[in-house]
Image (cartoon, rainbow, N blue to C red):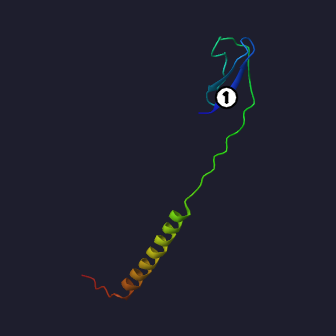
Amino acid sequence: MPRYRYMCHTCMTEFVAMHLYNEVQESCIYCESSEISKLLSRTVKIEHKFDTQTGQITKEYIETNKEILEDLKKESRSENYEPS
């Protein structure tokens, strides 16, 4: 849930409220005054770092299984199946 910063103009306190984007904070959480304003907030950028070794192992596994599947396809095409 997003966090929003507010400033109460009655008690001069800055506070954080968590609510959905389409909801509105109507009062101060400390003094319950309705004289509040929303402050600008910095956006948070989350960087995903992937382990290249895991990616390489996965790629090798996929390539190996592709080769096995190709061998199985060739083997099944060379077999003569007779209807029973």
Identify the residue at horizontal 37%, vertical 83% (top origin).
76
Give the image location of residue 44, x and y in percent.
67, 41
Give the residue drawn at x 49%, y 74%: 63
Q: Is residue 16 above or below residue 65?
A: above
Compared across the picture, whether 71 is left or right of 4 comes to left
Compared with 83, 38 (above or below) is above
Q: Position of residue 49 (x, y in %)?
A: 59, 55
What kind of residue is marked 1? Tyr
Residue 45 placed where, x, y %?
67, 45
Residue shown at 45% from the left, 76% from the top: 64
- Quadrant in which the N terminus appears: top right
- Among the 4 quarters of the image, the one containing residue 74: bottom left
Residue wearing tag 1: 4
In this picture, is 13 found above or below 64? above
Q: Quadrant of residue 20?
A: top right
On screen, 42 above or below 26? below
